[in-house]
């Protein structure tokens, strides 16, 4: 049985993403460590988001929220299973002193 081209592409993308995440554990996006962003994923995944964890909120304390706002209308977030509306609510839920005025 021959694998469809789409299935092969999806498998390659998944392997690539896993490798990037493993390689970039010391990397950050908008001044938030990748592992901190991963800690926030349950809080930004619909339909039943969990409350943000202490690890998630701690990771956001030094975030460049304007940078994160640039992802608000991106197709990247939904493609990763992240609800942009829930993501924009995190600063308030974490009681951060600075709001994400997107």
Image (cartoon, rainbow, N blue to C red):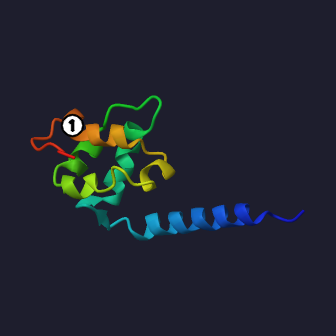
Q: Residue 51's image quarter?
A: top left
Q: Residue furthest right?
A: 1
Where 90 falls versus 74 (above or below)?
A: above
Residue sitting nearer the eye, 31 or 59:
31
Residue 77 visible within the image: yes
Residue 22's x, y, as percent? Answer: 45, 66
Q: Residue at x 41, y 32 (%)?
A: 49
Q: Residue 101's image quarter?
A: top left
Which quadrant of the rendered structure holds the N terminus? Answer: bottom right
Q: Residue at x 37, y 65 (%)?
A: 25
Residue sitting nearer the eye, 76 or 94:
76
| Secondary structure under the numbered disc 1 in the rendered image | loop
Q: Residue 41's image quarter?
A: top left
Q: Residue furthest left?
A: 97
Q: Residue at x 44, y 56 (%)?
A: 76
Residue 35's x, y, as percent? Answer: 35, 56
User: Does residue 28 appear left or right of residue 63 in this picture?
Assistant: right
* Circle 1 residue: 94
Q: Residue at x 30, y 64 (%)?
A: 28
User: Does residue 49 appear left or right of residue 17 in this picture?
Assistant: left
* Label 1 packing within 10 angstroms: few (<14), some (14-19), many (20+): some
Residue 15's x, y, as percent? Answer: 59, 66
Residue 63 visible within the image: no
């Amino acid at each position: 049985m021959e694998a469809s081209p789409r299935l092969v592409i999806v498998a390659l993308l998944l392997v690539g993403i896993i490798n990037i995440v493993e390689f970039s554990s010391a990397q950050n996006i908008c001044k938030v460590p990748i592992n901190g962003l991963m800690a926030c994923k349950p809080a930004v995944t619909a339909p039943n988001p969990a409350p943000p964890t202490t690890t998630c909120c701690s990771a956001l304390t030094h975030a460049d929220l304007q940078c994160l706002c640039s992802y608000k209308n991106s197709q990247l977030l939904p493609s990763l299973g992240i609800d942009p509306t829930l993501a924009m609510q995190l600063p308030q839920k974490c009681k951060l002193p600075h709001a994400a005025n997107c």
